[in-house]
Image: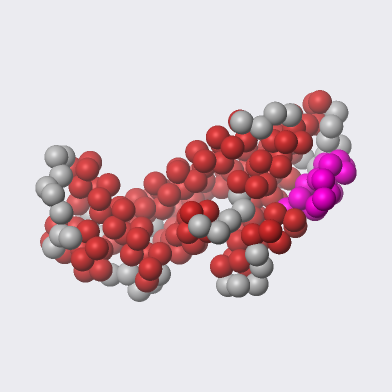
Amino acid sequence: MARPKNQAERRAQLIDATARTVVELGATATKLRDVARVAGVTPASVLYYYPDIQELFAAVFERSAATYFVSRERAIVQAEGPVARLRACVRSGVPWPGEGEQSTRLLFELFPVALRNEVAADRQRAFVHQQTELYRQVLELGHKSGEFTLIGDACALGRSFVALEDGYAMDLLVGDATAQDIEDRLLDHARIVTGNPAFGRSG
């Protein structure tokens, strides 16, 4: 591997290598030497930038969470009107085959890091808050326009969507649901909490 021009580039390369390794081996099985092998550097080089592999995991989680959130935000902004935006919010949170499923798998592999690393824990809390806010904003938009009759507080309902996403994503990762199953279930939830029949599965 060519020598990076600066430390930021080297860190980015190590984060890339760690992400690939975690998806392949799982976080619990990933060792510093595995990351070094994939990155094409020595273990000592990895330690120079990340003295603890948990710090490296936290960096991977932070970047992955940020990328995931920006992707969701972009999809929602491109939709017009509360119904279309809530559909976009739901769809962007489903781990569809390919990049979506891989991103979700990576994040789930790294979730336990938050139990041991305070930086990762802070990022996890922020990540959940950001996603909850996406839903809250769309739900309040629909409420103000008269298109949604919310059954509760928009923030609490937004958090319920995020919790359902996490639970259903785990179903998918263990082979107990498909991406389409998840979207259908979340749309059912959307119909219930908004009182809008547009969220029927065939809608």
Residue in the picture at 46% in, 48% down: 65
The answer to whether 158 is drawn above or below residue 15 in the figure is: above
What residue is drawn where x is 60% and y is 46%? 92
Residue 5: give x, y in percent of width and height: 14, 40
Estimate the x, y position of residue 69 in percent, counting from the top left: 52, 42
Colour scheme of this structure image? secondary structure
* Image vertical order of residue 62 relative to residue 18, above or below: above
Q: Can you name the residue that lies furthest to the top here? A: 145
| Horizontal side, residue 188 vs residue 25: left or right | right
89 vs 170: above or below:
above
Is residue 115 in view from this perspective? no
Q: Residue at x 78, y 47 (%)?
A: 190
* Residue 200 magenta-highlighted: yes
Q: Is residue 189 above or below residue 33?
A: above
Residue 152: image location, x then y, percent: 81, 42
Q: Position of residue 7 (x, y in %)?
A: 18, 42
Majority SS type along the magenta span = helix
Whether residue 185 is visible: yes
Query: Does the magenta run of residues contain 65?
Result: no
Q: How many callouts does the rendering have? A: 0
* Quarter placement of the N terminus: bottom left
* 186 vs 110, nearest the viewer: 186
Q: Residue at x 28, y 61 (%)?
A: 53
Left or right of 32, for residue 143: right
The boundaries of the magenta stretch are 186-203
Q: Is residue 69 left or right of residue 116?
A: right
